[in-house]
């Protein structure tokens, strides 16, 4: 007779125990909406103390209050903002890099300002934030987890997303290098490349059917 797969009444489910984040602190950059907010909610549900970081102060504070987490105002495109937010922060157990933006247009039409805006938000800021938080994790010597949110564009090409693709491809490669470099410190670095998820960033594109046409 096979043993019962469900735990006895009053006992924790094994999966809940394995994935519990009780006693852990998670910093989610880009947590005021979309994928970042969803991740923050699930980490809170798993027991973590969640620090929600974003540049949208009022929205961020409202979301943090809803979750019983902490709001950390930070613009990842601004090096000074990152420094001000992180320098006095204790090393979190988990860092999730979600913050990102996109400008969808023909490659030859991008202006230098548009190029810089996407690069600073999606890549340069993530590099600076991960460098600072990762250094704190290394110094603390208790390991850690870093999760980078990539994209389909981390692994394939679609039209009119060239600058976005540059950032997401670079983020995937940075993940591989840091996983090799920081593994000795028990810091695991991973990149998740989700498919199309309806958020404020791509809602219009999704509802117009452009996402489906691009995939065909």
Image (spheres, helix red, strand yellow):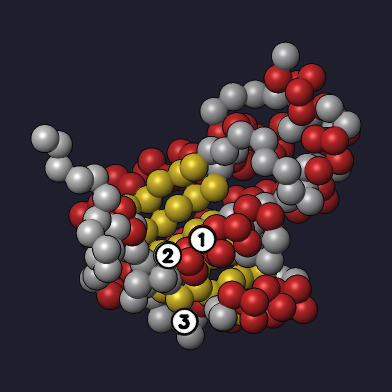
Q: Is residue 180 above or below residue 137?
A: above
Which residue has dot 1 on it?
A: 42
Say whether residue 77 is left or right of residue 27.
Answer: right
Residue beneath the point at 46% across and 44% down: 191
Instruction: Provide residue 45's location: percent of width, then percent of height.
Output: 48, 66
For label 1, the crowd category at 10 Å Cα-Cα, with few meaning under 14, some 14 to 19 and many 20 or more, is few
Which percent across, then down, holds residue 215?
Answer: 70, 20
Q: Estimate the x, y position of residue 190 in percent, counting from the top left.
A: 40, 46
Left/right of residue 19 with respect to residue 167 in the rendered view? left
Judged from the image, the secondary structure of the residue bearing numbered disc 1 is: helix
Identify the element where label 2 is drawn.
loop
Q: Secondary structure at mark 3?
A: loop
Among the two numbered marks 3 and 1 on one chain, the one whose residue lies closer to the N terminus: 1
Q: Is residue 194 left or right of residue 203?
A: left
For residue 132, which quarter of the picture? bottom left
> Which residue lies at the image location 81% right of the left edge and 43% below the top edge?
203
* Crowding at mark 3 (Cα within 10 Å: few <14, some 14-19, many 20+): few
Q: Earlier in the sequence, mark 2 or mark 3?
A: 2
Q: Residue furthest front?
A: 1
Q: CA distance from mark 2 to mark 3?
A: 22 Å
In this figure, which residue is indicated by the disc labeled 2?
Answer: 46
Residue that carries the numbered disc 3 in the rendered image: 89
Q: CA distance from mark 2 to mark 1?
A: 6 Å
Apparent side of residue 99 relative to residue 117 in the rendered image (left or right): left
Q: Are marks 2 and 1 in contact (CB under 8 Å)?
A: yes
Q: Could you tell me which quadrant the N terminus lies in? A: top left
Query: 37 above or below 64?
Result: above
């Amino acid at each position: 007779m096979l043993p019962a797969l469900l735990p006895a009444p009053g006992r924790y489910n094994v999966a809940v125990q394995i994935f519990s984040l009780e006693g852990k602190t998670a910093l989610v950059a880009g947590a005021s909406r979309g994928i970042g907010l969803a991740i923050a909610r699930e980490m809170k549900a798993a027991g973590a103390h969640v620090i929600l970081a974003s540049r949208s102060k009022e929205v961020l504070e409202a979301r943090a209050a809803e979750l019983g987490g902490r709001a950390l105002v930070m613009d990842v495109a601004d090096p000074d903002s990152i420094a001000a937010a992180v320098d006095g922060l204790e090393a979190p157990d988990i860092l999730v890099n979600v913050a990102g933006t996109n400008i969808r247009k023909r490659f030859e039409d991008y202006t230098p300002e548009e190029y810089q805006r996407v690069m600073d938000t999606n890549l340069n800021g993530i590099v600076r934030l991960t460098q600072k938080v990762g250094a704190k994790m290394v110094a603390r010597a208790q390991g850690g987890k870093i999760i980078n949110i990539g994209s389909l564009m981390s692994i394939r090409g679609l039209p009119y997303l060239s600058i976005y693709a540059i950032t997401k491809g670079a983020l995937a490669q940075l993940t591989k290098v840091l996983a090799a470099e920081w593994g000795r410190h028990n810091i695991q670095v991973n990149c998740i490349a989700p498919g199309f998820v309806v958020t404020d960033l791509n809602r219009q594109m999704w509802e117009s059917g452009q996402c489906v046409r691009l995939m065909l």
